[in-house]
Amino acid sequence: MTDPLILFDLLLAGSIVALAVAVLSVRDLFTAIVVFIVFGLLSALAWARLAAPDVALAEAAIGTGVTGALLLKTLHHLRHFSDGQTQDAARDLTAVQPVPMGVTVANAAFCGLVALGLAVAFLGAPQAGPGFDALVSDAMPHSGVAHPVTAVLLNFRAYDTLMEVVVLLAAVIAVWQIERGLTEAPAPALGMVWAGFARLTLPAIVVIGTYLLWKGAEAPGGAFQGGAVLAAVGLLLLLSRLYVPQPSHRGLARWAFVLGTGVFAGVALLVTGGGRVAFQYPPEHAKTLILLIEGLVTISIAVTLAALFHGREPVALNAPESRHDT
């Protein structure tokens, strides 16, 4: 008798592939974003079926929730900009030149080579190799935490995790620089029902995000999952206009952006004394240092993701907002 879960997995895999094709082929931008969000939810379910709950949580919170909100906000800006263009301004715009066929063929060939290389690597990999499970298990008593994924991310390969935090910092710096000269689209009126919904759900989201952070030392969760959930608090506050960023808040926001990266790098340098290398935590202080890093990185992730959703840097009302006004 066929296992029903096998049929479910086949249906799930086929749906993910079909949604990926649909995202690339749908012409309407709003429809494409909705399909992308559904694609992310099914991808999170697929990771859960692959016994990777940490990745599933990150995909659901960041890859689907926050990214979907960013795409919808971007679409709102694009539509506002398009509606505000006058015929004279439209005539002044330089026509977009079509991509030369040679460039398209070269890109397709390059993508094909990448796909072929991945296929060769996948097919050539050992099917029942030992992997790194034994190495991780042997090192767990010295990692400072009980959850192997957290140990890998914050201890065994902390360099990679630090670079991921740096990428988020670079992203918000780039967004603030790019949107400094753009006109801000007015936020849509959401009404009293939305404001009431935000007030009811905000405390629950704070509790869930904090729980994911604290539980990450011994179960699925951690800084990225907790930070993404806490970022939803910022998104709700911004959407409901319960919080409006002010120019006086820029200094505090900048400190929050660099807090996680600074403490992460600072701990790496701090532990190098006594003949150790970076991120080689003393066993008696490993858990404390990892919790310190995770807690402050969570704050930076939450504030950074909320700032990416808001977009432009808060400016004074009498400050010039756009180069297009001159």
Image (tube, helix red, strand yellow):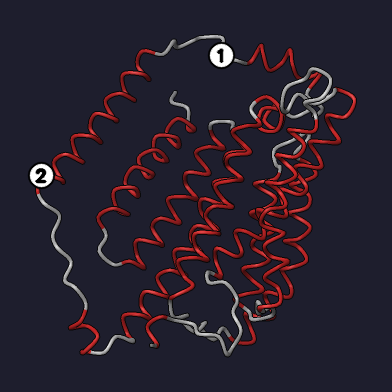
Q: Residue at x 39, y 62 (%)?
A: 33
Q: Secondary structure at mark 1?
A: loop
Q: Earlier in the sequence, mark 2 or mark 1?
A: 2
Horizontal and vertical percent position of residue 19: 35, 50
Q: Within 10 angstroms of label 2, few (less than 14), some, or many (20 or more) residues? A: few
Residue 322: quarter of image = bottom left
Residue farthest to the left? 101
Three-letter amino acid code at the position of disc 1: Gly
Residue 139: quarter of image = top right
Q: Residue at x 53, y 72 (%)?
A: 312
Q: Which quarter of the figure is the C terminus placed in?
A: bottom left
Q: Residue at x 61, y 84 (%)?
A: 316
Q: Within 10 angstroms of label 1, few (less than 14), some, or many (20 or more) residues? A: few
Horizontal and vertical percent position of residue 320: 50, 85
Direction from residue 58 to residue 213 in the image, left or right = right
Horizontal and vertical percent position of residue 260: 71, 48
The residue closer to the viewer here, 137 or 152, is 152
Q: Which quarter of the figure is the N terminus placed in?
A: top left
| Count of picture labels | 2
Compared to 245, does 204 lie above or below? Answer: above
Three-letter amino acid code at the position of disc 2: Gly
Residue farthest to the right? 284
Compared to 89, does 164 lie above or below? Answer: above
Circle 1 residue: 131
The residue closer to the viewer here, 273 or 195, is 273
Labelled disc at residue 103: none
Q: CA distance from mark 2 to mark 1?
A: 42 Å
Labelled disc at residue 102: 2
Q: Secondary structure at mark 2?
A: helix
* Mark 2 touches mark 1? (CB < 8 Å): no
The residue closer to the viewer here, 325 or 36, is 325
